[in-house]
Amino acid sequence: MPSLQESKLAFIGGGNMAAAIIGGLVSKGVNKQNICVSEPWDVNREKMAALGVRTTTSNVEAGGDADLIIIAVKPQVTKGVCEELGAAWSPRESLPVVASIAAGITLDSLKAWLKSSDGRTAHTVRVMPNTPALVSEGASGVYASDDVTPAEKELVNAMLGSVSKATEWVEREDLLDVVTGLSGSGPAYFFAMVEHLVASATALGLPEEQATRLATQTCLGAGKMLVESADSPSQLRKNVTSPNGTTHAALMSFESLNFKEIVDKSVQAATARSAELGKQ
């Protein structure tokens, strides 16, 4: 298995997540001509071409001799795309590794659809990225089929590492639903928190522009502390909570409103919905 720098990469779909990963790959020095994107929409294809990579409207052409294929299309069209790719693989001596970011599509389905006419199936992984990948601060959960080799995992790691600061391989496929409830949907939880912080401060008289700047930087700073500190989240919370101080007052309000249960139910709801979509 070649290294990331030596590999030929194919993206089936040229939406925002594909663009984010490609941008990350290019910034890491991956040869633009080793990347090919298949995208039917002119606008998206032109955006990909502007990055300097090769583009086409043909999935088979894009995936022709690729070492790693990233399926980055809507779940409802994934089956057709995979079957098209699989049908074209019979002449190949070795099949590519396939990484799917199509939400909810199970590994069993992917492997059934990616089967070549001579009965071979590509080694396949499922990836649950999140939108901070758009600013190279992503977090990704990954699950691999049993036949994926350590070298193939390393290639997927390197690809995701271009936009994800945390890439976690889970031991069971159902845990990808938990990853979805945690980090996949998680950015929206923080956006909602900041949205309400700004609204509250504005209602108390602070100009909205100032409240927004203070709230967003607070979120960024707290996140950086979480990443860089050796302390646990609970310890960091204790570090800024003086007895009977302002933070203590706010956290007591959280407690009285059962904040822990609110967060728990929210993550459970997103996890359950992810599992439901997978079954559909």
Image (cartoon, rainbow, N blue to C red):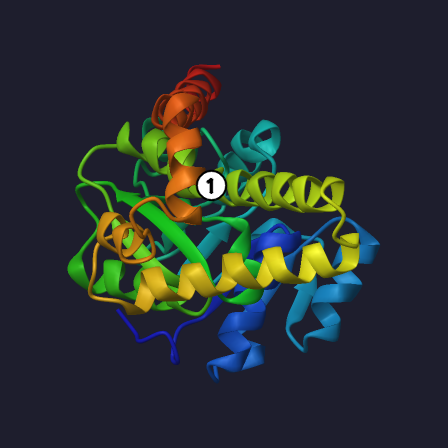
Rendering coords of residue 82 (x, y %): 50, 38
Direction from residue 216 to residue 234 in the image, left or right? left
What is the x, y in percent for residue 280?
A: 49, 14
Which quarter of the picture shows residue 36?
bottom right
For label 1, the SS is: helix
Q: Residues within 10 Å of mark 1 (few under 14, many from 20)?
A: some
How many numbered circles does the render carry? 1
Where residue 197 sits: x, y (%)? 61, 44
Is 260 left or right of 235, judged from the image as shown? Answer: right
Q: Which residue appears at 58% of the width and 54% of the height?
A: 17
Q: Residue furthest front?
A: 244
> What residue is pinned by disc 1?
186
Residue sitting nearer the eye, 191 or 245: 245
In this view of the protein, which residue sits in the foreground, 225 or 270? 225
Q: Residue at x 76, y 65 (%)?
A: 47
Can you say whether 147 is above or below 149 in the image? above
Give how far across and how far down residue 151 sits, in percent: 20, 64
Q: Residue at x 70, y 66 (%)?
A: 48
Q: Looking at the rendering, which quadrant does residue 261 occupy? A: top left
Q: What amino acid is labelled 1 in the image? A: Gly
Task: Using the image, determine if residue 274 lies above or below residue 195.
Answer: above
Image quarter in which the N terminus is found? bottom left
In this view, the residue in front, 133 or 105, is 133
| Residue 267 is at least partly visible in this image | yes
Q: Is residue 117 visible?
A: no
Q: Residue at x 46, y 81 (%)?
A: 28
